[in-house]
Image: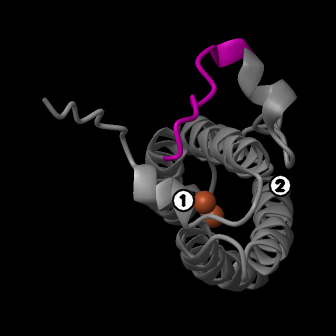
Amino acid sequence: MLIFIIQMGRTAKEIVKANIQEIISDLNKAYADEWLAHYQYWLTAQWIRGMDADTLKAVLLQQSADELMHAEILANRIIQLGGTPVMQFDKLIATAKCGYKEPPSDPANLKQVVQDVLEAEACAIESYNELSEKYRETDIVTKEIFEDLLEDEVKDEEEWEKLGANLV
Ligand SMILES: [Fe+2]
Ligand SMILES: [Fe+2]
């Protein structure tokens, strides 16, 4: 009698030429950063006030939702590779590369909001650029994910540069 042992994602893992644990660790860092950006943007949207606050709030909420979608894509790739996405909330900051910046203590300091978001986006752009290069030859699927996210963050940065230039 033939016994088939079904291994999840066997071929998917076989085609990866890089160290799987290292890929999972890189994916988890990005996952933590996306969650922190999601939270930072969402909370900032609730917190801010002043002349241009409504314009910024709409963009913050939209991008906050986009970052959560990025976290979802990363979590799914981690699981596909047999890894575990960061399970404890208090591990997110320790795992992240770009980190978390709380909303400015003065809710009317919109320039600070723009600066903080631009910093987060710049870090994400550098990081995704580096990671898509790193896995160019060794893990095509992960490379494509990092490349797609890179494209999104480049658009985010552009939007915030325009918002910053139009602030009174
Ligand atoms: Fe993102
Ligand atoms: Fe972003």
Would residue 100 be found to the left or right of residue 144 on screen?
Answer: right
Q: Is residue 89 above or below residue 64?
A: above
Quadrant of image for the C terminus: bottom right
Distance between the alpha carbons at the discs numbered 2 and 1? 41 Å
Would residue 40 be found to the left or right of residue 76 on screen?
Answer: right
Q: Say which amino acid is labelled 2.
A: Asp
- Read off the magenta span: 81-90
Tell me which image quadrant ligand 1 sits in.
bottom right
Residue of label 2: 116
Category of crowding for the residue at label 1, using alpha-carbon neighbours closer than 10 angstroms: few (below 14), some (14–19), many (at least 20) = few
Locate residue 122: give its quadrant.
bottom right
For residue 126, say whether it is visible. Answer: yes
Q: How is the image coloured?
A: one colour
User: Could you say whether the residue bearing mark 1 is in a helix, strand or loop?
Assistant: helix
Magenta stretch secondary structure, dominant: loop
Residue drawn at 54 percent across, 77 percent down = 148
Magenta stretch: residue 40 in it?
Answer: no
Residue drawn at 75 percent across, 81 percent down = 161
Locate residue 48: give its quadrant.
top right
Q: Say which amino acid is labelled 1.
A: Glu
Mark found first going from the N terminus, 2 or 1 = 1
Q: Is residue 41 above or below residue 47?
A: below
Residue of label 1: 14
Mark 2 vs mark 1: in front: 1
